[in-house]
Image (cartoon, grey):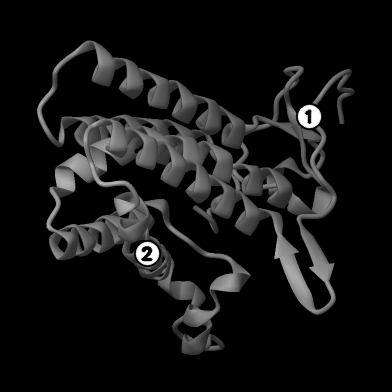
Amino acid sequence: MHTIATFIPSPSNGVWHIGPLPLRAYALGIIGGAMAALWIGEKRFVARGGREGLISDVAIWAIPFGIVGARIYHVATDPELYFGDGRHVLDTLKIWNGGLGIWGAIAGGAVGALIACRRYGVSFSSVADALAPGLLVAQAIGRIGNYFNQELFGKPTDLPWGLEIDVEQRPAQYINEPTFQPTFLYESLCNLVLAGALLWIDRRFKIGPGRLLAMYVLGYGVIRFVVEGMRIDEADHL
């Protein structure tokens, strides 16, 4: 084991209890991110001439659909966790035990938003373009949950910003390595940079409807590809 002069310490606990109610840092990160995305999206949509409150109306549909989509994606990509000998199918419903997929969340949320837009008679592309930068900010904030859960990290590193991981959370082959690449932080920072880039492009150029959303999907896809390539822990969360 090598000695690290400086590093990022990980929290020892990501769950607090208020009586019988568990309060999870991961859930707080998602909620905080969702609130930020709604605030940014609302401001942008109204500034473009949209109806005030419409983004919140769309969110009532998009958020539940996103959660369901995230869970379906997780179960579909990790079926061995829920089906077969010694497994219980009903565990697929226990979302509180972890297991969400970001691409399922995006797809499900888009379906919910599309339904809402048709109900309210508004263009889906106008809503999506208004929301795109805020979604990246939301995803950046949501990564705080990975920090508290000691997950989404890369290979061992001696860099000053190496992330300290408890022994029981380390992969077996790296059991004697104390600090790892904080890939959750890399993704969070990249999301913020991409959000800033989208805002700049939207102000600087006159781009067609839906193109900002396309840039979001493409840019975030590249970020996730790189981050997942660095990751060495098991992918149980978004």
Relative to 14, is 181 above or below?
above
Element at label 2: helix
Dot 2: within a 10 Å radius of its alpha carbon, few (fewer than 14), some, or many (20 or more) residues? Answer: few
CB contact under 8 Å: marks 1 and 2? no
- Residue 11 in percent (x, y) is at 81, 45
x 73%, y 64%: residue: 23
Along the polypeptide, which appears first: circle 1 or circle 2?
Answer: 1
Question: Which amino acid type is shown beneath numbered disc 2?
Answer: Ile
Give, as a three-letter code, the residue at label 1: Ile
Residue 204, located in which quarter of the rendered image?
Answer: top left
Report the side of 130 relative to 35 (left or right): left
Residue named by callout 2: 60
Q: Nearer the viewer, residue 231 or 12?
A: 12
User: Can you identify the residue that label 1 sits on?
Assistant: 8
Q: Secondary structure at mark 1?
A: loop
Name the outermost residue toward the top: 204
Q: Is residue 120 left or right of residue 222?
A: left
Q: Nearer the viewer, residue 214 or 115?
A: 115
Looking at the figure, which quarter contains the N terminus? top right
Tell me how far mark 1 sits from mark 2, CA to CA: 37 Å
* Residue displayed at 52% across by 88% down: 88
**How far across and down, in percent of the image, does residue 54 sit?**
29, 52
